[in-house]
Structure formats: structure tokens, C-alpha cells
Image (spheres, coloured by chain):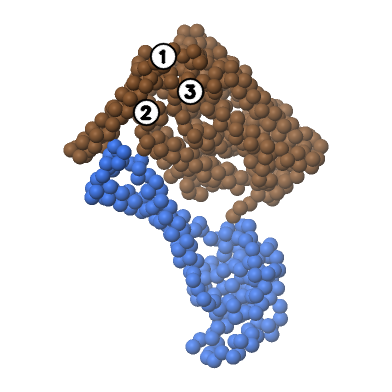
Chain colours: A brown, B blue
Amino acid sequence: MSADHNHGGDNLYRIPADNIWANAWKLAAVLGSIGLIGSAFGAASNPERFAFSWLFAFYAFLTFALGAVFFVLIQHLTVSHWSVTVRRTAEFFAAGIPVFALLFVPVALNADTLYEWVGHGASHEEGHDDGAEHEGEEHSSGESLVGASTARAQAPQEADAHGADADGHAAPEAHGPGAHNSPQHQLHGELLEHKAPYLSLTGWYVRAGIYFILWFIVAFFFFRHSVQQDEDKSLDHTRKMQAFAPAAAAIFTLTLSFAAIDWIMSLEPTWYSTIYGVYIFAGTVITIHALIIVVVLGMKEHGLIGSAVNIEHFHDLGKLMFGFIVFHAYVGFSQMMLQWYANIPEEIIYYHERWHAEGWKGVSYFLIFGHFVLPFLFLISRVTKLRLSLLSFGAMWMLFMQIVDIYWFVMPNASDGFSPHWLDITSLLAVGGVYFGVVFFIMKFFPLIPIGDPRLERSLGHVVT
Amino acid sequence: MSEDENTPDSPEDEALDGEKAPALYLAEFDTTHDVLHAAEKVRDAGFEKWDVHTPFPVHGMDAAMGLSDSKLGLLVFAAGAVGLVGGFAMMMGMNGIDYPIIIAGKPAESLPSMIPILFETTVLLSGITAVFGMLALNGLPRHHHPVFYSTRFERGSDDKFFISIEVGDPKFDLEKTRELLASLHPTHLELVEETVP
């Protein structure tokens, strides 16, 4: 098997001017502009909702870009040849990461709206009654356990027992943007003071800067060497990329985890999960495999890459996506199970908001079935993964579910119940339009396949069965 | 290929008492390319009880032999489903009905606490079915096959490629099958016989 696709000379695997992909960036730019205008109106009319919607959209698409960085890294770490022909697509999406530094500006400007911990410095005044309040809290927990047991023994209905148990804590009820005068706010105060050394606005800005700088360095290092190799075919680029990959993977892991903590987890500053970074990571990996499947199939259908990416590549991408869907569910369940079992107020509040608050239970069920159960059953068979139309549908569905997942992370903090807002859509259009516009624009200037890669030949003939 | 090599010449066979009966034709090839195309011809001739023996997996052989997807996946999926439902029934029966003990204020039959067990029973039954189902579908364990009467077949684990067509095949015919295999230009063709008690 070999590349039978030939535009001849320098145009190998490049997007011709008359191809629909040459104009893809314009479509993204138009959608992005509509989104930006809409979001600008929203920012003026409803600044608080805008802040949360924008953070949601920003982070949802950031996971696309971070997944792309990871995909490039892992291929060099594992010295894999199968993925060479699809790696350039990931490199494009990784190279779009600087855009997010600009898109981060509204988040940075609205930090005081988004994050409850902003302003909770060392000079916190509300901590006097904390001891007494804490006792009361424990007392009520104890009672609720007894109550739940009694309810269980008398009327074996899960809903009753569970309701009594959760309501007994009372803490989750009082949480939310409007609850700053409640007794729980004082408990918060104590915990926030404890976390003040990390959750300070200055530190948060500095760390954000560090994340972006490190992401630029990693993304551009791999992109630059890969496209230079297209020209000079030098093996040095491969050696350098492989040498840097382990360090870059360490940088990636740490920045991804800390960025998740800083930007999303600290929305609920008293809540914590030690597996949070892994949870986010699992989502990004599903996302990049889904994204590569969709985009590469789109390019293949318009004759841009000939047979360079064959059914075996798609099958492998599908298998990896499937594996990480299971991994994501595993991590998500592990986090939920431990916190559900311990039932500590500052931990369980997270799930309380996403289960008992109005409307969110439906979204939680939607995630359980839409992000795991149904994709699992749909993608488990090789029949589905080998039918490109079905695989591509599954991949698009997973991209959608990733956005829902981030929505579920962020938006319970924006309002007490589940209340979608048009700003969510405009923010998605704005961030997605700008990001995809830039990525599609970059695509016009480079070959879509790393034609200088020494392992290209093996990837072209990639066969598994 | 010469005529005098067409009968088994293994000394071990001579030592065995009893009548000899044809067991299979064994055609030997030098390259994956040859054996792949020969397999396609045998497939098209409509044989059922035949096989290709190669020292390593040959890409595209499944299609060349006309093999359909393994049924193992379906078996494993069914077993996993049984494990899931069985695990749920077990947990529900023990924790929800027989001994409803309240632990940490949770309802006795609460689903989250069951999920690790359901996962385990699902994986357990799937894993067992995968291993033993694979053995069963491959007809293993099997301690004897007439193909090993051929001394040339030893190189089937080294550098030669073989196609065997068994006598038990409905389309098997001593003359016609020989002609078919000979037309595929094997480097060697023999009729392997086995001792019938």
C-alpha cells in the first residue's frame, strides 16, 4: 500500500484553493463573529451570566486544544508509527492554543464574579462563630443518619431515605451565589482562609500566565519541528521531539491538573477532589480522538489526503476513544463514589448541587447514559468502529458530550437550578469560532500529513488485521 | 514437485500398525504472497474443512480465507451482561432483601455501592468466557492432528507456508483436489495419510 494521492511537487497533501476546506476558516470566523457580538451584548446586559458562560465555553474548547497537545506528546513518547498520518491534524489543533490566552481575558477580568474565594484574604472577619457552627453541623449530621436509618427500616424506599439523609445536612441548600449571609458562609470563611495561600488572585494570575507560556512552548516546539521536517526531511527533528517528549509530558500533566484546579475546581472553593486532574484529562483524550476522527474523515471525503489515512487508522482511533470513554467513566464514578460514601458536607455539596438542585439531575443522568452507557454499547463492536459513518457519528456525539460535561462542571455555580441561557450558545460560538477559525487558517499553509516524518512509510501501510 | 514425494515418508508412520487412509492434502509455498493467492483460490472453490498454516500472522489472510468475524465477541458480551445482571441480583438479594443493614446512613440497596461489585462480576464472567470461549472455538485442547505426520510441516513454524485440505470436506476428491492444489503452483504437494485403527 502506498500513497496514490499526488498533487505533484510542493502541493503534496496541501489544501487546494478551490477545496471547501480552504474556506472552512471563513465559516468558523463568521460563526465566531456572531458569537462574539452576542456575547458582547450579553456581557453588558447580564455580566454575571456572561462570566460563567464564557468560562464554560473557554474551558470546553481548551480541552480540545490540550487533548491535541497530549496526542502529539504521546505519539513521540511511544515512538509510534501508526499515528504519523493523523498526527499533523493534532499538531494543528495544538498550535491553536495561543488563541486561548486571548480568550482567557474575559475570565481573568471577571475573576471576582466567578470565584467566591476572591477577596477572602487573611483579613477575614466572619470566622468568630465557626467553632459553634461546626458543632451544630456535626450534630445535625448525626441526627440525619438516625433519621435515615429509621426511614429505611419503616419504609424501604430509597428516595425517602436518601432525601432525609441529604436534607439533614442542610449545608448544600444554603450554598450558592446568593447565600453569603448564611451560617455556612462562615464555615466557608474558615476553610477559605485555610486555602488563602493558594487561592489568591495574584497567584492565580501568575499561574495562568505560566500555564499559557508552557503550553505555547510545548505546542510550538512540536509544531515547528514537524513542519520543518516536511522541508528538510532531517532525522534531527524526530530525535529532538522524542527527547523533549518526556519532559513535555510532565509539564502537560502538571499544568493541565493545576489549570483545572485554578479555573474550574476553585469555583467551589471548599470542595476538592484529588482525582480532578485525571477526570479532566480523560475527557480531553476522548475529545482529541473524536476530533481527529471527524476532521480527518472530513478531509478524506474531500480528497485531501487520499489513502494516507485508511480504515485501520480510524479503527485504532475509535478503539482508543472507546477505551478512554471507559476510563473517563471509571474516574468519574470513583470520585463520586468516595464522596457519596463519606458524605462530608464540603465534599457532598458538589454532587448535591448536581443531583438535587432543580433540573440538574436530568443533566447528570444524561451524562451517565450519554457519556458512558450508550457510547459504550454503540462503540464496543468493531462493526461500528469500522463503518466510518457510524464511527464519525459516535465521535461527533462524544464532542457534544464533552461540552455537556464541562457545562455540568461549571454551570451549577451560575444559578441555583438548571437554567440554560442564550449566552451559553453565543459563548460557545465565539470561543469555538475563533479557535477553529485560527486552526483551519493555519491548515492552509502546511501539508496535512507530516510528509518528512521517517515513519511515514510505515504509517501509510498501517494494517492490523 | 516430483511424484515420488507424494506419499508420506516418515519412518515413524511405518512403525505404526494398521491401515493407512488419506487424511489431507498439504501444499507448501515459499512466500506469503503465494500462499495468500492460493488461499483465495481454495476459498473460491468452496472448501470448508481447510486451513492455512504460517509461521507468523499474514495481513489480509482473514479475507483471503473468507473467514467471518469471530463469534467470541458476542459470547463475551453476553457473558458480561449475565455477570452484570447476576451481580445486581446477588447484591440486591443479599443487601437489599435478606440482610438490609444500614451502613453510613445509606439505603441498603443503594446502587452506587453496588457498582464496584457489578463491575467485578461483569469482568469476571467476560474474562472467563473470553479465555474458555477462545479455546472452545479453536477446538482446543487438541492433542493430535494428521498434519503433523508430514515431516516437511516442521518448517511451518519456521519459513514455509502451507495449505491443508482435509478429506472430511464435502468437496474433497482425491483427484480433483490434487489438480486444484497443483494448479496453485505449490513448491511441494503431498497427500498426508494417517493410521486408522
In the rendered view, does B102 fall on the left or right side of A412? left
Question: How busy is the neighbourhood of tag 3: few (under 14 within 10 Å), some, or many (20 plus)?
Answer: some
In the rendered view, does B95 fall on the left or right side of B131? left
Q: Which mark's residue is nearer the viewer, 2 or 3?
A: 3
Q: Is residue A265 above or below residue B113?
A: above
Q: Which residue is mark 2?
A: A345
Rendered image: mark on residue A402: none
Q: Quadrant of residue A298?
A: top right
Q: Residue at x 21, y 36 (%)?
A: A150
Q: Is residue B40 above or below residue A125?
A: below
Q: Which residue is mark 1?
A: A126
Tell me the CA gap for discs 2 and 1: 19 Å
Rendered image: mark on residue A194: 3
x and y percent of residue A325 in the render?
A: 49, 40
**SS of the residue under disc 3:** helix
Which of A207 and B31 lies nearest the eye of the viewer?
A207
Which chain is mark 2 on? A
Which of A340 and A306 lies nearest the eye of the viewer?
A340
Q: Tell me the kind of residue under disc 3.
A: His
